Image: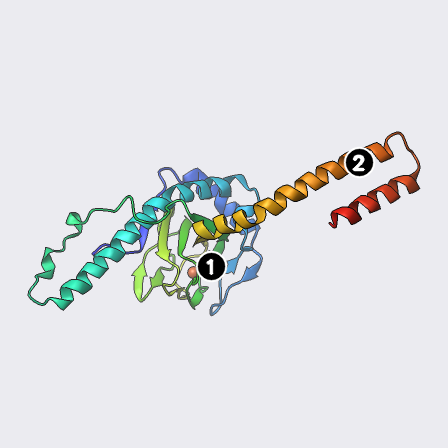
């Protein structure tokens, strides 16, 4: 059965991973809940304008439509199994992954997914993260930066998954997972997870409501700036300038 945990491997990750490891290691801020927990950066690694982080996220953004299409197909396949369960005379073996076609045009906006949070996480041996999920985020994309031999696995809904450097794993945000601390694990296990939201219609509605106000404000600002320019033109008197600016700000109600 097709799984909703989907992975893709970066074609050439070694140089990128070297840079990412340095970036994560240099930005570690706090400790995650664990026993003991690994260390992590802030949640907004994707907003800091760091070149290699942006390269990684551009690659992940390109993969999102494919990942959600596969996840959607997996969800539909699970529904088929449920339907077949109701009809005991149907042979479940007819369900073969090779017969399932990925729905590349599902009835939702494949481009409506956005990275909302991203952070780096770093574990030395004996460190982990307690059982948690990323609900209410739609998906999480976890990219593995550095996986030395003997690194801890991730336990996803009770299933052990071995991380691979250069691999991004997409999983639905509600799935529970953990990294169990153990002294025989390797130092330096590093990953960059990103939380992804689905928000196409919400944004459009928000924009449609505020656009008229924004346009009106911009027009007022433009005319006030012109007035201001005329008033202060040629004046070197600070009081005149101050009065003109205060008056304009009051009228615009900024
Ligand atoms: Fe997590």
Q: Nearer the viewer, residue 156 or 134?
A: 134
From this viewpoint, is residue 187 visible? Answer: yes
Q: Quadrant of residue 236?
A: top right
Q: Is residue 89 above or below residue 62?
A: below
Residue located at (86% from left, 34% from top): 232
What colouring style does the render use? rainbow
Q: Is residue 118 above or below residue 160?
A: above
Quarter of image, ligand 1: bottom left
Q: CA distance from mark 1 to mark 2?
A: 63 Å
Q: Residues within 10 Å of mark 2 (few under 14, many from 20)?
A: some
Q: Secondary structure at mark 2?
A: helix
User: Disc 1 or 2, which lies upstream in sequence?
Assistant: 1
Residue located at (22% from left, 60% from top): 79
Q: Secondary structure at mark 1?
A: loop
Q: Is residue 49 left or right of residue 4?
A: right
Residue located at (47% from left, 49% from top): 115
The residue under label 1 is: 124
Query: Is the residue indicated by label 2 positioned so its CB lies within 8 Å of ligand 1?
Result: no
Q: Residue 85: horizontal and vertical position, in percent?
A: 15, 66
Residue located at (52% from left, 47% from top): 208
Q: Is residue 18 left or right of residue 8?
A: right
Q: Residue 113: horizontal and vertical position, in percent?
A: 42, 49
Q: Residue 149: horizontal and vertical position, in percent?
A: 36, 53
Q: Residues within 10 Å of mark 1 (few under 14, many from 20)?
A: many
The residue under label 2 is: 227
Q: Quadrant of residue 161?
A: bottom left
- The image quadrant where one finds the N terminus is bottom left
Q: Residue 254: horizontal and vertical position, in percent?
A: 73, 49
Asked if labels 2 and 1 touch by Cβ distance under 8 angstroms, the answer is no
Residue 249 disc label? none
């Amino acid at each position: 059965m097709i799984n909703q945990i989907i992975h893709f491997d970066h074609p050439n990750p070694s140089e990128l991973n070297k840079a990412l490891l340095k970036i994560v290691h240099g930005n570690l801020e706090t400790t995650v809940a664990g026993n003991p927990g690994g260390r992590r950066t802030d949640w907004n690694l994707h907003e800091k304008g760091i070149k290699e982080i942006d390269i990684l996220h551009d690659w992940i953004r390109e993969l999102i439509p494919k990942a959600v299409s596969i996840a959607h197909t997996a969800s539909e396949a699970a529904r088929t199994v449920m339907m077949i369960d109701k009809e005991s005379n149907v042979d479940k073996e007819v369900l073969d992954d090779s017969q399932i076609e990925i729905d590349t045009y599902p009835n939702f906006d494949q481009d409506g997914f956005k990275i909302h949070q991203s952070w780096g996480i770093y574990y030395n041996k004996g460190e982990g993260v307690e059982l948690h999920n990323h609900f209410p985020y739609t998906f999480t994309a976890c990219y593995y930066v550095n996986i030395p031999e003997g690194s801890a696995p991730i336990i996803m809904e009770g299933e052990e998954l071995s991380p691979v450097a250069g691999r991004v794993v997409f999983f639905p945000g509600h799935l529970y997972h953990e990294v169990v601390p153990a002294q025989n694990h390797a130092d330096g296990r590093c990953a960059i997870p990103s939380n992804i939201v689905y928000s196409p219609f919400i944004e459009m509605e928000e924009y449609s409501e505020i656009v008229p106000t924004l346009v009106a404000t911009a027009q007022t600002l433009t005319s006030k700036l012109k007035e201001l320019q005329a008033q202060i033109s040629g004046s070197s008197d600070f009081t005149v300038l101050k009065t003109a600016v205060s008056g304009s700000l009051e009228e615009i109600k900024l």
